[in-house]
Amino acid sequence: MLFFLLIGVFVVDADLAMQKKTEVKMLLEQSNHHATFAIHPVLKTEGVIELVEAEALDRFDERMLANGGYTRQGNDYLPGSHSVTTDSLSFARHYVDFLSWRKDHHLLLRFTGTNLMLEQVTTGAARPGGGLLEITVTTEKGEQLRMAPKAMVGPSHVVVAYVNERPFLPMLPAHSFPVVSVEELKW
């Protein structure tokens, strides 16, 4: 009987982790979508679509608070009482601008156990239809997590968050996973 109870706890814990991943993904997508409306109005009249990054981050923060109850402190989003996670979300962002969105980009990030840092951005060959975005996150244990490549169709705002949360029960492993949102600028 105890064996089946233990298996049930593992299943419930895995289900909670998947629900959290889905919720965090939707929250990032909504927040990033709102952020991508922060384009430079004067350049837009000249046919150049560029992001006003300070405004984009403010807009991102607004939606993280409104939709998820998170407030930003540095490079972390601290959860509120009704947030989907109980521990903070570390995040990093990168803007692929008007001049370079047709080139391939590889973002290398490192999670130190408390912070997610963008270590390196490597650009590659240009593609007529838009570049590919590849993201690799190195965990605090040295494991490399490669996200599925994304195709860019214009200047894009990229946000990567890393969930590192305590498990349902202390004897279970932590819920640790990266989540990415890539949104084209809205014009």
Image: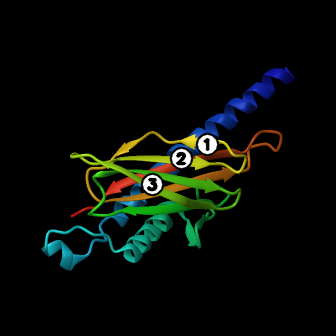
Bin the neighbour count of mark 1 within 10 Å (Cα to Cα): few under 14, some 14-19, many 20 and up.
some
Q: Residue at x 82, y 44 (%)?
A: 170
Judge left or right: residue 3 versus residue 121: right
Q: Residue at x 27, y 63 (%)?
A: 99
Q: Decide which of tag 2 and tag 1 comes sooner along the chain.
A: 2
Image coordinates of residue 172 in percent, x first then y, are: 78, 39
Bin the neighbour count of mark 2 within 10 Å (Cα to Cα): few under 14, some 14-19, many 20 and up.
some
- Disc 3 marks which residue? 122
Q: Decide which of tag 1 and tag 3 comes sooner along the chain.
A: 3
Image coordinates of residue 95 in percent, x first then y, are: 39, 63
- For the residues marked 1 and 3, what is the alpha-carbon distance in whole angstroms? 17 Å
Q: 111 or 38: nearer the eye? A: 111
- For the residues marked 2 and 1, what is the alpha-carbon distance in whole angstroms? 6 Å
Indicate the amino acid at tag 3: Thr
**Quarter assignment of residue 45:** bottom left
**Quarter assignment of residue 177:** top right
Q: 67 or 50: nearer the eye? A: 50
Judging from the image, what secondary structure is the residue with disc 3 in? strand
- Disc 2 marks which residue? 136
Indicate the amino acid at tag 1: Gln
Q: Residue at x 56, y 71 (%)?
A: 72
Tell me if label 2 and label 1 are in contact, CB under 8 Å.
Answer: yes
Bin the neighbour count of mark 3 within 10 Å (Cα to Cα): few under 14, some 14-19, many 20 and up.
few
